Amino acid sequence: MRFKNNTRQLKKSIQGLRSFKDSLPKDIKKTIIKRAYIYSQIIDNWKHIAGNDIFKVCFPKSFKNLSSLGIKRLNIMVKKGHELDVEYSRKVIIDRINTFFGYEFVNNIRIIPFEDKNEKFKKNKNKEMIKSKFIQKISSIKNDKIKDSLFELGKLIKEK
């Protein structure tokens, strides 16, 4: 990439490929960076903000700032069956987020339920993998100590 000074224009132009970030207007760049930073702060500190019980059953999906209406809404994905727990702790979550940022960042939370099918499949896959593939490979090991420790490790993985 090479910088070129155009004598007919006030701005410098860049020859070659430009990154997407450089091609955006400055006003849009500032809002995107600000929203992305704040949303990433919420995601990074979600366990601290929500608490351990709520952290296990939900996560933040997106943040909507409707400035014309004065609504600052955080959308939260919640596992089905745990909506009531999150509903009761909605005010606590809003207070914790606002105290975390030091100003009124969120004034509404929208709860979006989802079905967590992945956990069921993960558990079944882990059990099947240990039963079929690894038992044959472990039984072919000649050292008894290693063989026993691998079987115990497989049992621990099954329990989780």
Image: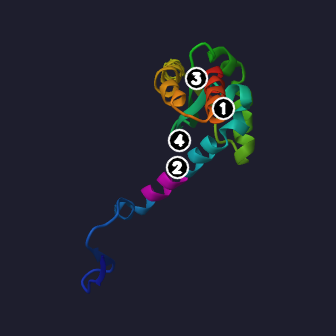
Q: Position of residue 57 (x, y in %)?
A: 63, 24
Of the numbered discs in the image, which one, if any, rests on residue 36? 2
**Do labels 3 and 2 touch, CB within 8 Å?**
no
What crowding class fits label 4: few (fewer than 14 Cα within 10 Å), some (14-19), or many (20 or more)?
Answer: few
- Here the colouring is rainbow
Q: Are marks 4 and 3 in contact (CB under 8 Å)?
A: no
In screen coordinates, is 24 left or right of 107? left
Calculate the distance from the C-alpha at mark 4 to the C-alpha at mark 3. Answer: 26 Å
The residue singled out by tag 4 in the image is: 67
Tell me if 35 is positioned left or right of 88 in this view. left
**Amino acid under disc 3:** Val
Task: Say few, some or many: other residues with alpha carbon within 10 Å of mark 2 (under 14 / 14 to 19 / 20 or more).
Answer: few
Distance CA(mark 1)–CA(mark 3):
39 Å
Q: Residues within 10 Å of mark 3 (few under 14, many from 20)?
A: many
Secondary structure found at label 1: helix
Q: Which residues are magenta?
A: 28-36
Comparing marks 1 and 3, which lies closer to the viewer? 1
Quote the CA–CA distance across marks 2 and 4.
17 Å
Q: Is residue 148 left or right of residue 34?
A: right
Mark number, residue 78:
3
Q: Which residue has dot 1 on it? A: 149
Question: Tag 4: residue type?
Answer: Ser
Q: Nearer the viewer, mark 2 or mark 4?
A: 2
Q: Is residue 100 above or below residue 18?
A: above
Q: State the quadrant of the N terminus.
A: bottom left
Local secondary structure at mark 2: helix
In primary-sequence order, the first of circles 4 and 3 is 4
* Mark toward the start of the polypeptide (2 vs 1): 2
Q: Position of residue 131 (x, y in %)?
A: 51, 20
The image shows residue 120, relative to residue 56, as above or below, that is: above
